[in-house]
Amino acid sequence: MKILSKRIHIRVAAGVADGAILFSILASLAWFYISYHEEVDRSRSQIKQIITTVEQTASIAMYLGNKELAEEVLRGLEANDIISAARLTSQDGLSASFSGSENLAQSETAIIFPIPSPFASNEVVGDLLIYPNQQYIEDNAISLAKIQVIVLLFYLVIITLLTLIIVNRILTEPMKNIANRFHLITPGDTTRIEVPAAHQQNEIGALVDDINGLLDAVNTQIDNERELRAETENLSKKFRFIFERASAGIGLIDSNNELIVANPALLRLLGQTFIVDTDRYDKTDFIAYFNDPAEMKEFIDEFWAKPGNQFSAMDVQLKHKVRAADRWVHCLFSKVEDINNPDDSLMEVVVYDITERAEREQNIIYEAEHDPITQLLNRRAGMAKLESSLVESEKKQRNFAILMIDLDGFKHVNDTYGHDAGDKVIIEVAARIKQFFRGSDVVARWGGDEFLIGFSYNPNYETAVSDIASDLQFQIALPVEIGHEQTATVGSSIGISLFPDNEIAVAGLIEQADEAMYFVKNNGKNFFKFYQHLEKEAVQK
């Protein structure tokens, strides 16, 4: 029943039937009302016609006072079904009547007809009282109304059946056939629905044309999507190939500085073979892979704080692995922002291995700053380091000493044994000097056979500088093997200037140490001398 109630022709027919039933009810009520009153009016007209027929006879009977004639008139009236009772009454007291009811006097439906004289129309000889048969009249009206209702119901059934047949034939069947054919068509199929016969120019034909047009549009869209999907898959393969085969490391970092995606190259750079499953393990901390995590964290935090999608790069050293050489990488950062969800923004990082370049740069810098023979700082680099060391000593409230060393007898070694032997002596002396000092101290070859040393010391240790100078002279004076079982010996003249006791500027301190060293050279050599203000005058004398 539910399936039937959903069919269009059934629903249309039911709608028509419901309307017809409502109309029949209203029409039956109206027809009953109209028929009833028409029947009453028609009965009254018939009564008037009957009275007109018997009026002349009744007038004579009343005028003559002939009761038999009057009763004859009443018998004629009694034979009519629409009259239930009648009474003739004359002015002279003649009275005659018939009644199908025992209570005629109380009837409210009596109709009084004055009976004129047969000889003078303006003279009344009596009255004729007629009682219509109301039950008969109402029964006739009801019977007539029932007939009309039956006719209307018959019309209703005929109209409903015709509507059902017509709608089913004209609308439902064609629509059903169209739907069945439409269901057989799969996406991408070139089959199309044919327009039903006799429907080429109506709405059903237009509907079929629209459906076929929609199928064409769907097929076109499917073809376009297939092509786009193929292009996307091809492009995805290329990007995946690039991502997996790229020589540069590529990764994504979330707002917590955790590495969530990385290609094989990045994993190799970071010394890993896989990235842990984020559903089962914690994600990898990106900054933990670097030699200075604090520096990397500060850089990334500053980059996150920058507005917009900017780029930034830095060269940084990876964390040193056991039994592995130091590795340097160039990191290029860029933001991958989600406008709708800023908290979900990511950072893309591209990492290049620049170890060889960094080593070359470091070698170049090293060669530019160091003496090629002794590997000590050269004069320019030594001067720069003296500047920074002096500033650092002043901050820490420590004293600073500069020693200018000139080798005694070095020219004799060169002249006697040759320059190769001289180089060996210089290299050995440089090694002996360097072992006395820390990495933060300044040890430089100032030129030729001159060395410059700068170091900070505790001001409470008054003999620190003189002790170091004495030990240096002792070590320098030890014999140096120059080959062929031969040795050479050199001495040293050392000039010393102190900060802050003497000059406070580096250039002044160097000049003072140099003056003190020349004082030693001019006064017997092979000892050390602290700079004094009158020392310059003594040198000049």
Image (spheres, grey):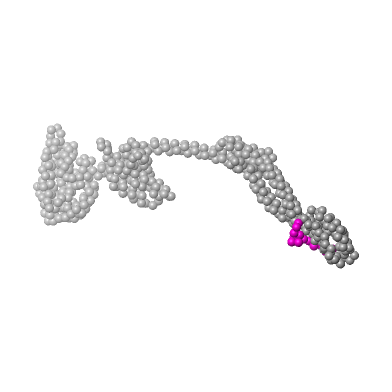
Q: Is residue 113 magenta?
A: yes
Residue furthest left in the image: 524
User: In percent of the image, x 39 and y 47: which residue is there?
Assistant: 344
Q: Nearer the viewer, residue 297 or 256?
A: 256
Q: Is residue 295 visible?
A: yes
Residue furthest right in the image: 119
Query: In screen coordinates, is 19 left or right of 452?
Result: right
Query: In screen coordinates, is 241 left or right of 222?
Result: left
Q: What is the number of callouts on the image? A: 0
Q: Which residues are magenta?
A: 101-115
Q: Nearer the viewer, residue 326 or 95?
A: 95
Residue furthest top in the image: 484
Q: Quadrant of residue 90?
A: bottom right
**Magenta span main SS:** loop
Q: Nearer the viewer, residue 525 or 32?
A: 32
Q: Quadrant of the N terminus?
A: top right
Q: Is residue 87 magenta?
A: no
Instruction: Give the percent coordinates (x, y) of residue 399.
Output: 16, 53
Q: Is residue 159 visible?
A: no
User: In percent of the image, x 10 and y 49: which residue is there?
Assistant: 523
Instruction: Give the percent coordinates (x, y) of residue 190.
Output: 59, 35
Query: In screen coordinates, is 199 left or right of 527?
Result: right
Q: Nearer the viewer, residue 270 or 128?
A: 128
Query: In screen coordinates, is 301 left or right of 74?
Result: left
User: In percent of the image, x 86 and y 60: which residue is there?
Assistant: 67
Instruction: Give the percent coordinates (x, y) of residue 536.
Output: 13, 54
Instruction: Give the percent coordinates (x, y) of residue 473.
Output: 11, 44
Q: Quadrant of residue 172?
A: top right
Q: Quadrant of the C terminus?
A: bottom left
